[in-house]
Image (tube, rainbow, N blue to C red):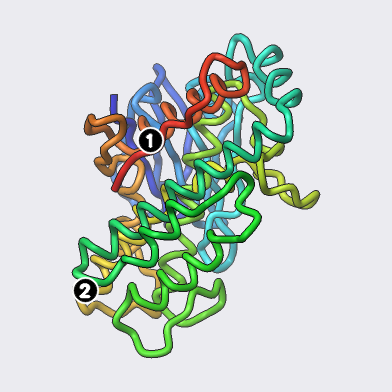
Amino acid sequence: MIKRTLFFSNPVYLSTKNEQLVASYPEDGKKEKTAAIEDLGFVVLENSQITITTGLLMKLVQNKTAVLTCDQQHLPIGFLQPLVGHTEQTERMRHQLNASVPLKKQLWQQTVMAKIENQGNHLLQRGKNALKLKRWAKEVKSGDGENHEAYAAAYYFQHLFDIEGFSRNQKGVAPNNLLNYGYAVLRAVTARALCSSGLLPSVGIFHRNKYNAYCLADDIMEPYRPYVDLLVYDIVETGCPLEELNTNLKRELLSLPAMDVVIDGKQSPLMNAMSRTTNSLYECFEGSSRKLLFPQL
């Protein structure tokens, strides 16, 4: 089932009644709106004047709905997740924590290969040369000690957008702002799926920064990044102004969880595909599988 994404950019009072999310706009005189909580996958709270009741937060968490809060630049900065995401959470986390170094290196190798392969496929879709990326994807070794991921990313962004001098930089010129927003949404999608699979988003297979609470999410989302790039590229091609991340642009980027992808030969919404990926990761930790399942762009 495809879950809905709700985005609130104006002051609103959010509460719950009869298993529904209730949005009230007392100051604007707008009509009260409702949405079934069981249908919600993501709720984005952008305005600092939004009021939300603890009763609603409790029901959203119980439904495993990801609640994202934003900073002054309107970028997602916080993510509310359940303490218990799976009935076998303790056992699953134990398998994750006991994973050997060789296993983690093999998993990272698969992750990087899938990411570079998808980057190459995206360039090919745009009629651009991807021979180097296709070659590098096959040359990635266990642990990616030769850092093919970084070389591939640099080449990919140098050739993706037809914007003179463009480079991928969080504080760089547009469409970096769109990429930042899209990746933040993707990170929340990944963290939500990891929690639902009973895994710790903080303990990564490659990323291990002690200040990063989502190391594993940053690992697993890598092959999915080109789907954000695909959305952003389409937006750039429309020729609309990109300097200001307005509501229409955010609406386009927030369609990411419901975006169709192909995984294991079948079409699936991205958020469902991510759950399959995180479940395959657990199976690798547990020892019943040695292969991560990623979508192919």
Q: Which tag, 1 or 2, sits closer to the chain's start?
A: 2
Q: In the shown orientation, is residue 118 left or right of residue 172?
A: left
* Secondary structure type for disc 1: helix
Residue at image position (44%, 73%) is 155
Residue at image position (42%, 46%) is 114
| Quadrant of the frame with the N terminus | top left
The answer to the question of whether label 1 and label 2 lie on touching residues, with beta carbons closer than 8 A, is no
Q: Identity of the amino acid at label 2?
A: Glu
Quarter of the figure with residue 202: top right
Q: Identity of the amino acid at label 1?
A: Met
Q: In the shown orientation, is residue 132 left or right of residue 248?
A: right
- Spot the residue most to the bottom: 164
Q: Which residue is mark 1?
A: 271
* Secondary structure type for disc 2: helix
Around disc 1, counting alpha carbons within 10 Å, would you say few (fewer than 14), some (14 to 19), or many (20 or more)? Answer: many
Q: Which residue is mark 2?
A: 237
Real-space Cα separation, disc 1 to disc 2, in angstroms: 25 Å
Front residue of 31 and 79: 79
Q: From the top left corner, tell me how far across and down residue 292 is, in percent.
A: 47, 31
Q: From the top left corner, tell me how far across and down residue 181 is, in percent.
A: 46, 60
The numbered disc on residue 162 is none
Quarter of the figure with residue 238: bottom left
Q: From the top left corner, tell me how far across and down residue 68 is, in percent.
A: 53, 45
Q: From the top left corner, tell me how far across and down residue 89 is, in percent.
A: 65, 15
Identify whether 169 is placed above or below 251.
Answer: below
Total numbered badges shown on the rendered structure: 2
Front residue of 252 and 56: 252
Around disc 2, counting alpha carbons within 10 Å, would you say few (fewer than 14), some (14 to 19), or many (20 or more)? Answer: few
Residue at image position (42%, 34%) is 274
Residue at image position (54%, 75%) is 169
Front residue of 204 and 253: 204
- Spot the residue most to the right: 210
